[in-house]
Amino acid sequence: MIPGQFEYHRPASLAEATGLLTELGDDARVLAGGHSLIPMMKLRMAAPSHLVDLQDITELKGIARDGGEIVIGAMTTQHDLIASAELGAAIPLIREAALLIADPQVRYVGTIGGNVANGDPGNDMPGLMQCLGARYELDGPNGRRSVAARDFYESAYVTAAADDEILSRICIPVPAPGHGYAYEKLKRKIGDYATAAAAVLLTVSGGRCDSASVAMTNLSDTPVFAAEAGATLAGSDLGSAAVDAAVAAALAAINPGEDNRGPVAFKQHVAGVILRRAIARATDRAQ
Amino acid sequence: MAKMHVKMTVNGKPVEALAEPRTLLIHFLREELSLTGPHIGCETSHCGACTVDLDGKSVKSCTLFVGQANGADITTIEGIANADGSLHVLQEMFREHHGLQCGFCTPGMITRARRLLAENPNPTEAEVRFGISGNLCRCTGYQNIVKAIMAAAAMLNAQKEAAE
C-alpha cells in the first residue's frame, strides 16, 4: 500500500506550524501520531499534498496542573497518559480509557490531540472529554481560542476547528476528590473500535448522587454527551429506578448505524448493558 | 516530488539516504537498508510483524513515514543478538520453548518482548499477554511465546543478580 505523494514539513514551534498551515492552505494536514491519518493515506482516502509533522514542538507535549485544571499537550501520547502518576491520581478515568485504546505499539505513538481532533466517532477520547467537561485550545492565524468538547463535534470527521487551526491543548477540570468514575468498552478484539462504550463520572454524598456526567462512544456519527442521563442520576439515590431512567435517556440520545459490529437493535442493547456496568462501577468507586 | 535527506541510527550504525517522503519506515528498512527481519504482514498496523524499537518505544514501522524517523535511534531484530554474535536471551528462549512455528511473527514478537522486559523486568503472565497484544501469531496459540518471554525474564533477572 503506497500513499500518494506529499511534501514533508517538521516545524520546530507552534507559530511556525500555524504559519505553514496558513501558507499551504487546505492541501496541508497536520501529522500527530499518524495512526489514523497514515492508514487513510494508504487507502488513498486521504491524499494531502503537505504533511506538517508536529513531533518537534515541545510546547505541545506534557501534562501539567494549572489551578483547577489538568492541561495536556496535544502531542502527549496514550502511553504518556498511562504512565503519568499525577494524571492517574487526579483523573483516573483517563488512564482506564487509554488502556483500552488500540495496542501497546499504537499507544506509544498515538496522541490525545490526534484522537480528539480527528472527529472519528470510533475514537474513545472525544466522549471521555465530553464526560469530563474538557475544553480544547485551538491555535490559528488569529491567535488562540477555546472550544468546549461538548460543542466541538459536528458530524463524522467534521469539527469546530478550521483548516488553519491546530488543536494544541486539552484542558480538563479536575473532578472532586472521591469521585466515582468508569469507562466501559465492548470491543470484538484488542485494537478494535468500540461496539459501544460509556464514560461515567459522578459524585456521591450521604447516599445521594450530587452530580453525574454520561457520554457514549461510537453510537452516533459524533460522540454523544447524554446530558439528560446525567441530570436523571444527579439528585437520585442511584437505585434501580434512577439507573433505568438514566439508561433510557441515554439510549434516546444515541443513533447507532448498522455495520460489521452488528445491527442497530444489537447496538442499542449493548449500549444499555455497557452503561449499566459503567454506572455501577462508578457508584462502587465513589466515596 | 523531491526526495528528502534522512539520517538515523539503525542497530548502532549511522545511516544516511535519500527517500521519497511517502516511503514507509518498513519499506525503507527492508528495501534501502536490506534489513528484512522486520516483516510486512498486514500493513494495516494490526499484526505487529513490522515492529521495531524507535527511541525506546515499540512501533509498527508500517505506520510511520520515513521522515518521522529522521534523527531516530532504531533497533531491528538484526540488532538484538549479543555483541559476540551469540543469541540474545529472548532469542534463546524462543528456541528453547518452541515459541515459533512458521517464524513470520517472531522478529516483531522478540523486538516487542525486549522493550516490554526493559520496562517491566518481572511481568506476570497476564502482563506479558497484555504487553504483546499488538502482535499476532497464527501458529502457536501464544502459549509457548508467553512461556519463552517469562523464561527470558527469569534468566535476565538471574544474570543481573549475578553481575551485582
Image (cartoon, rainbow, N blue to C red):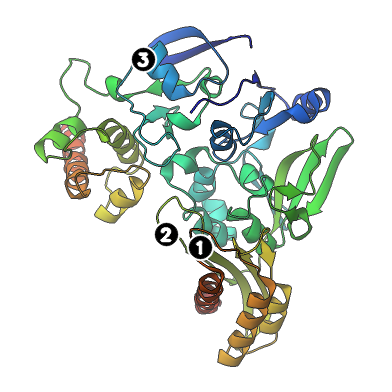
Could you tell me which chain the residue with mark 1 belongs to? A
- Looking at the picture, how far across and down is residue A126, in whole percent? 65, 55
Relative to residue A181, is residue B64 depicted above or below? above
Residue in view at x 39 percent, y 29 percent: B53
| Residue B164 visible within the image | no
The chain identifier of the residue carrying mark 3 reads B
Question: Three-letter amino acid code at disc 1?
Answer: Thr
**Mark 1–mark 3 contact, CB under 8 Å?**
no
Q: What subunit carries mark 2? A: A
The residue depicted at 21 percent of the width and 50 percent of the height is B141
| Rendering coords of residue B6 (x, y %) | 53, 12
Q: Is residue A245 left or right of residue B140?
A: right
Residue sitting at 66 percent across and 45 percent down? A118
Above or below A269: residue A3: above
**In the image, which disc is placed on residue A188?**
2
In the picture, measured across the screen, residue A99 lies left or right of residue A133, that is: left
Cα separation between marks 2 and 3: 40 Å
Q: CA distance from mark 1 to mark 3?
A: 43 Å
Q: Give the position of the C terminus of chain B as an image quadrant.
A: top left
Q: Is residue B86 left or right of residue A37?
A: left
Residue type pointed to by label 3: Gly
Q: Residue B12 got which mark?
A: 3
Residue A175 seen = yes
Q: Secondary structure at mark 1?
A: loop
